[in-house]
Amino acid sequence: MLIYLMGVVLKNSPEWLYNGTALYYALSLDQMVKPFGGWLLNFPVLLKYLTFGTLAVEFIAPILFIIPYKNAICKFIGLLLLISLHVGIELTLHVGLFSFICISALIGLLPAPYINIIETKVYRLFNHSPAISSNNFEYLGVLQSKMIGILGASFVAYILIWNLNTIPSTPELIPTKAKFPANVLRLDQRWGMFAPRVTKTDGWYIFEALLDNGKYVDLFNNKDIRDLDYSNNKPDYLFKHYKNARWRKYLEGVLKRSSEEEYENIGLVFINSWLEFNDHEIVGFRLIYNHEYSLPAGYSTSSNKHILYIKDLNSNL
């Protein structure tokens, strides 16, 4: 629940709090959006209310878990709200296993009365009597250890402070020497999805190679570039331009690091991979990134071509 509350704290930009345009810009990220999400861009007013609704769910649902009056019902309503939030994310955006992991964890928080009902119905379905009740679950002795509880609470507190430290103008809450556990145990988690604001920069890569037969090929997906204007035309469904979500995330990091050496290394990887499985030689190579900037609803965007790396083996390129 702390993850959702921290998400509300970190989402402090005008797009979330005042303009209500955060979801519009999130669904404008062609690298992540699904067809249904792209269709929702036609309804900017609806997306405005959904933006404020997202903040409301992330704030209200955790509070429902600690309301003492009819706690089981309040918890159940909170779970439905959060699961609905993740279903919406999964329907509109490519976020890997994020939504499935969160929903699985939330199901584990079902109140005992509801678990009993589900358990009874499942056993009746298979003509068996319940052998145990969820109220009778016994934790393993090792989980009862106070030391483990203290350690877990310490990790959560550390991550909370780490996240608070990402808020602009916040003083340094974790000294440099105290950041060692974060690097070793990967406690450097950031719980603010699309926070404090949604990025408005987008784009796609072209691994453009000139072959010895005069043809151009995009080495990233082995597409024949019959027209050099290919590198200016955005693919219809940009996420499919990437092999998988890990490639998309890695190449996003490559662009952020903006390392000439890394551009060269990744270019050589694709060049060597092509040469290993194809007969034609590569006589020239360019790593191109077509940069787009998301504009408000009603405005059309255009891309700018940036040549990140050139391996010039032939003057024709």
Image: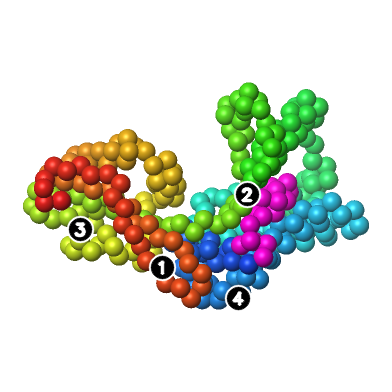
Q: Which span of residues is magenta-colored?
A: 1-18
Residue 208, image x, y percentages: 23, 51
Question: From what the image shows, is residue 50 above or below residue 102?
Answer: below
Classify mark 3: helix, strand or loop: strand
Left or right: residue 217 versus residue 46 is left
Dot 3 amino acid type: Asp
Front-most of residues 261 and 276: 261
Outermost residue, right side: 69
Question: From what the image shows, is residue 94 above or below residue 19?
Answer: above
**In front: label 4 or label 1:** 1
Q: Residues within 10 Å of mark 4 (few under 14, many from 20)?
A: some
Dot 1 amino acid type: Thr
**Disc 4 and disc 1: Cα gap in Å?**
20 Å
Q: Residues within 10 Å of mark 2 (few under 14, many from 20)?
A: some
Residue 276, image x, y percentages: 19, 39
Classify mark 2: helix, strand or loop: loop
Per the image, the residue denoted by label 2 is 192
Per the image, the residue denoted by label 3 is 224
